[in-house]
Image (cartoon, rainbow, N blue to C red):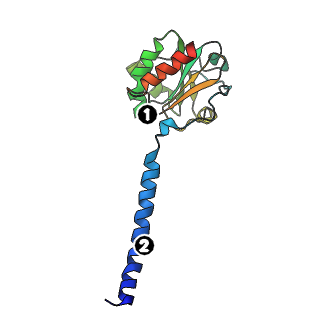
Amino acid sequence: MSATSAQRKLLLLLPFAAFAALAALFFFRLGAGDPSRLPSVLIGKPAPSLSLPPLGGLNMPGLEPEAFKGRVTLLNVWASWCAPCRDEHPYLVRLSADKRISVVGINYKDTEENARAFLARFGNPYAAIGVDRAGRAAIEWGVYGVPETFIVGRDGRILHKQIGPIDERSFPAILKEIEKAAN
């Protein structure tokens, strides 16, 4: 094989090698992090001061800034169309029985009819539900996607953020954060 023939083969293989290297880099960098462990810039900051209307057809209040003052509050951002929200719902029902906290929700980009049907089917763990039809409140809270859960201290400051559903793996950490906030 002549030098020019070897050089041509090398030139033909070079784009494939570069592509393989980039693909490996993207694969490892994208798979390296657990998005639920992303730090929130809102930790330690006051909860957003927003008023959200109540979910129609239920005899419960919307979400007001006062909901985050004076007691530990767990805020869950959810939607009826969100499959992981269904998976985490039993954990929220369990948490709603904990007298140390108040569980409130933001219903995100949902129809009221579907949200009510979701709660009728799976149970309503919320003391208050604010409706965020346009998703603006979720932006203020720094929500990446539903479900997300926040623990807000008695002083109205955000103490913890859970990205993704509460599940068997994350439930003990949520309980630990509630214990820290309640004491």
| 34 left or right of 182 in image | left
- For label 2, count other residues whose C-alpha is less than 10 Å away and answer few (under 14), some (14-19) or many (20+): few
Give the Cα separation between the discs numbered 2 and 1.
Answer: 41 Å
* Disc 1 element: loop
Question: Is 31 positioned to the left or the right of 43 in the image?
Answer: left
- Circle nearer the N terminus (2, 1): 2
> Which quarter of the figure has residue 151?
top right
The percent coordinates of residue 33 (x first, y second) are 47, 43
Amino acid type at circle 1 is: Cys
Q: In percent of the image, x 52 and y 21: which residue is there?
A: 177
- Label ID, residue 15: 2
The answer to whether the residue labelled 2 contacts the one labelled 1, judged by CB atoms less than 8 Å apart, is no
Which one is in front, 32 or 125? 32
Q: Which mark is residue 82?
A: 1
Quarter occupied by residue 8: bottom left
Find the residue positioned furthest to the top. Answer: 99
Residue 36 in view (yes/no) = yes
Q: Can residue 118 be seen at all in this image of the molecule?
A: no
Q: Is residue 6 left or right of residue 173?
A: left
Q: Residue at the spot x=46%, y=49% of the render? A: 30
